[in-house]
Amino acid sequence: MNTASGMWVLGLNTTGTQNTASGYYALYDNTTGSCNAAFGNNALANNTTGACNVALGRSALYDNTTGLRNVAVGMNAGDNNTTGCDNTIVGHYALRYNTTGHSNTALGVQSLYINTTGTKNTATGLNAMYSNTTASYNTASGYRALYSNTTGVANTASGAYALKSNTTGNNNAAFGYEAAFSNTTASLNTALGDHALRYTTTGGSNTASGQYAMRYNTTGASNTASGVRALYSNTTGSYNSAVGVYALQSNTTGYANTASGMYSLQSNTTGLENTASGMNALQYNTTGA
């Protein structure tokens, strides 16, 4: 049994059953689709054989034709989805341009807004993963987290602006306000803490844990920094390891240094292949190697 309330609601339905629709043109093109619920003007308007969909809001899931088991709540939520299945969409214009992408979760206004065929993405927050198109297996939580991502896969970003500039970088993880903010194409970076790896662009395989850890790194690669402001000034230096508050803080281009302990190798800038272990160890070394 179907329930229809409003002008042209379920207008073309032939054998579809157990549908509920309310609102101008809601489920209008449905023919054999069953177990759908549409509430709002033009909600699920073009659905034909798609089943078990829920659309709540004006033009929600508007272009869905054969897609199954989608839930869309909000004005124009998922309105370009055609055959995509198992998407969960909450927020005005969330997943708006999705066509065939499936198993996505978008919670927040304009989250996953431009996604077309990307699958198994989760975006929570206003504009989270806004620019994603075909990338899959990403998780973004926070205002504009992974905002610019287009085709980068398997990234995790939690915090406002985390991994905001990432476009094609893969397998990155950023947790904290503006963590890995400038990362664009670099892969295999891990940033844990506010502003960690903030200015890294293409340097990959870095691990920064602690507020401001490796904040100014740009293209330096394969560095490890653990502690507040560890490797803070590093820009292009690579293969450094800094463990401790302010460890290797001033290092810019020096590489293959190892500092373990608070303030160890703190003043080092371009020095190479130094090893310092203990609080204040080699604290004032600058260019010595």
Image (cartoon, rainbow, N blue to C red):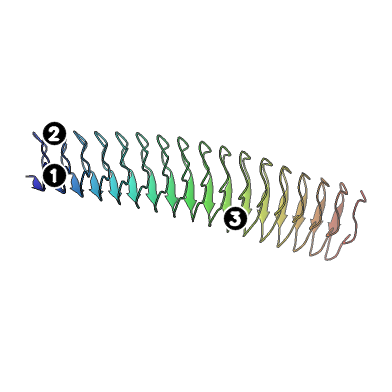
| Vertical arrangement, residue 67 with respect to residue 4, above or below | above
Vertical position of residue 74 compared to residue 96: above or below: below
State which quadrant residue 112 falls in: top left
Point 87% across, 62% down: residue = 281
Q: Secondary structure at mark 3?
A: loop
Could you tell me how far apart the alpha carbons at marks 3 and 1 are, in whole angstroms?
A: 45 Å
Q: What residue is shown at x 24% (from left), y 33% (from top)?
A: 66
Q: Which amino acid type corresponds to the residue marked 2 in the rendered image?
A: Thr
Q: Which quadrant is the N terminus positioned in?
A: top left
Decide which of tag 2 and tag 3 comes sooner along the chain. Answer: 2
Q: Which mark is residue 19?
A: 1
Q: Viewed as shown, does residue 228 lie left or right of 13?
A: right
Amino acid type at image mark 3:
Glu
Q: Secondary structure at mark 1?
A: loop
Residue occupied by mark 2: 31
Mark-to-mark CA distance, 1 and 2: 11 Å
Mark closest to the chain's N terminus, 3 or 1: 1
Q: Residue furthest right?
A: 288
Depth check, front residue: 145 or 288: 145
Report x, y in % for residue 128: 46, 50
